């Protein structure tokens, strides 16, 4: 069945600053679960069934959520909870953002498959190239100088869009596999709706036209043809509303701050509720911020510390393994700087008192581990201090994979309490906030107003005012018009000011 390539492009520039692309696509749910919403979700009023697939490709992990839209029925949003070669099926609703390429540039393994011991061994033997953190290679050029550490290079002869396209293709395959295996007659269901599917792709705060165009191009290269393209700040709000997290915070016009702490970035957004004749909507009340302060930078600081600590010892060659053990265990368990932390990496016979290694475990002071986290916390606190929201705010919601860190949560809760802010986070599934929210955005459209990131205006000619200091500084450029009045050319007349609605 050939896919129709309908392309309908709408650019909402000043108020929503987002790009929509209308095209076919599909996805299907299993065991529908109704999530609590701010207002009851309406029944789907379209003429025919279709699928909506939300893709969130994070720096370290990716997530998929989907919804089957059926005329006259209330939509349900569900996650893909099973990926090829993934352990703990049904647990995290996420998959590692990893790809292995062979020396000819062909994809050999993606996601959890790229972590299998047999695959890693073969990758070493055949000198495959690993693509990780590839999302950050798409970041705006203005943010190159503020990365805490250098990024792993892309595989030879591969651009960031090439890798993105390959991973999108893999995620689409995962969605198809999950749906066809999970439903009675799932294969027929997929084939019947594949020609009319809607995709929702997400990106961090601050990624605008150029980055959106690259992601759109990658989706086209992957054969998906993107549909709806939204900044992640609003998508996180949709997730919080869907799960009842923002209900109390948004009463009486109070605002709420959402901190999405992910693998590569920490995104901070702020909203307040507005009631209109059309129903409840939400307005942005501060410029969204994107910080390179996610969990990968914690891991990298740990790697540098371990490299220095073990340099010259017989364990120096085990750095990658020790780092991996820290990343998968110690970092996740860390709660209090007063507690000793252990990285179990070796055999019972591995002992070195000078290096604090006993029975194959490397002992670290809790304060040392806290120092790996602290720069990320400091960056968040500085950004919070610079927010200047346009409405009172009393609540902060912490989501994202890094948001699951008990240390980060307790530190933010303690520090922000002194500023009159109460921090809370979902009990579970913080990793799928963006993927779920992506589909919710498509269905619900809660956000109606955004704060301008720039000042927009026009070049104009204006009357010279001698009392204006800036006019006097430009007196030498003044000209007289036909009436003999002194005028200043090439002046700027604002239409929409930065940080305004």
Image (cartoon, helix red, strand yellow):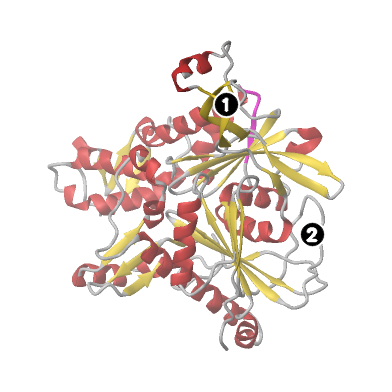
The residue singled out by tag 1 in the image is: 481
Q: Residue lying furthest top in this view? A: 467
Residue 149: give x, y in percent of width and height. Answer: 31, 42
Magenta stretch in the rendered image: 419-424
> Which type of secondary structure does the marked residue at label 2 adopt?
loop
Q: State whether residue 383 is above or below residue 323.
A: above
Q: Is residue 485 above or below residue 30?
A: above
Q: Which residue is mark 2?
A: 41
Q: Quadrant of the C terminus?
A: top right
Whichever of labels 2 and 1 marks the residue nearer the N terminus, that label is 2
Classify the position of the N terminus by image quarter: bottom right
Of the pair 298 and 442, the residue shown nearer to us: 442
Residue 393 tag number: none
Look at the image and say whether residue 68 sits in the magenta stretch.
no
**What secondary structure is found at the residue carrying circle 1?**
loop
Can the viewer see residue 483 in this picture? yes
* Residue positioned 80% across, 47% down in the render: 280
* Residue at 69% in and 30% down: 394
Relative image position of residue 414 (x, y in whole percent): 57, 27
Q: Mark 2 or 1, which is nearer the eye?
A: 1
The residue lying at 45 percent from left, 47 percent from top is: 332
Residue 325 in picture, x, y percent from top left: 34, 52
């Amino acid at each position: 069945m050939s896919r129709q390539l309908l392309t309908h492009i709408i650019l909402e520039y000043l108020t929503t600053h987002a790009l929509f692309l209308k095209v076919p696509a599909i996805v299907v749910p299993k065991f529908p679960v109704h999530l609590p919403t701010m207002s009851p979700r309406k029944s789907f009023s379209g003429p025919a069934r279709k699928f909506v697939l939300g893709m969130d490709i994070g720096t370290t992990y990716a997530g998929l959520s989907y919804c089957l839209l059926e005329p006259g029925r209330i939509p349900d949003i569900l996650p893909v909870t099973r990926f090829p070669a993934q352990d703990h099926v049904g647990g995290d609703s996420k998959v590692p953002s990893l790809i292995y390429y062979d020396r000819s540039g062909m994809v050999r393994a993606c996601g959890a498959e790229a972590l299998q011991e047999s695959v890693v061994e073969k990758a070493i033997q055949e000198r495959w190239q690993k693509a990780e953190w590839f999302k950050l290679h798409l970041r705006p050029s203005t943010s190159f100088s503020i990365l805490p550490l250098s990024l792993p290079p892309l595989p030879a002869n591969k651009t960031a869009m090439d890798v993105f396209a390959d991973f999108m293709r893999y995620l689409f395959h995962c969605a198809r596999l999950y749906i066809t295996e999970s439903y009675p007659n799932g294969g027929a269901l997929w084939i019947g709706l594949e020609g009319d599917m809607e995709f929702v792709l997400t990106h961090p705060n601050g990624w605008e036209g150029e980055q959106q165009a690259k992601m759109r191009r990658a989706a086209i290269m992957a054969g998906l043809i993107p549909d709806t393209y939204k900044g992640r700040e609003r998508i996180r709000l949709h997730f919080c509303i869907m799960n009842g997290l923002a209900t109390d915070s948004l009463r009486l016009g109070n605002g709420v701050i959402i901190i999405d702490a992910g693998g590569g970035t920490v995104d901070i957004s702020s909203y307040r509720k507005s009631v209109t004749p059309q129903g409840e909507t939400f307005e942005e009340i501060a410029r969204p911020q994107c910080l390179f302060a996610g969990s990968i930078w914690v891991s990298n600081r740990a790697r540098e510390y371990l490299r220095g600590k073990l340099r010259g010892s017989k364990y120096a060659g085990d750095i990658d393994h020790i780092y991996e053990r820290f990343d998968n265990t110690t970092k996740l368990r860390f709660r209090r700087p007063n507690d000793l932390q252990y990285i179990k990496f070796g055999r019972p016979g591995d002992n070195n008192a000078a290096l604090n290694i006993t029975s194959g475990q490397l002992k670290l002071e809790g304060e040392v581990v806290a120092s790996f986290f602290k720069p990320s916390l400091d960056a968040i606190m500085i950004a919070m201090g610079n927010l200047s929201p346009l409405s009172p705010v009393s609540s902060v919601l912490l989501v994202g994979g890094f948001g699951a860190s008990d240390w980060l949560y307790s530190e933010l809760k303690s520090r922000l309490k002194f500023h009159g802010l109460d921090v809370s986070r979902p009990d579970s599934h913080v990793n799928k906030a963006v993927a779920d929210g992506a589909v919710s955005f498509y269905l619900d459209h809660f956000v109606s107003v955004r704060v301008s990131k720039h000042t927009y205006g026009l070049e104009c000619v204006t009357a010279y005012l001698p009392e204006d200091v800036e006019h006097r500084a430009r007196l030498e450029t003044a000209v007289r018009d036909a009436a003999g009045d002194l005028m200043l050319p090439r002046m700027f007349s604002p239409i929409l000011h930065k940080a305004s609605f």
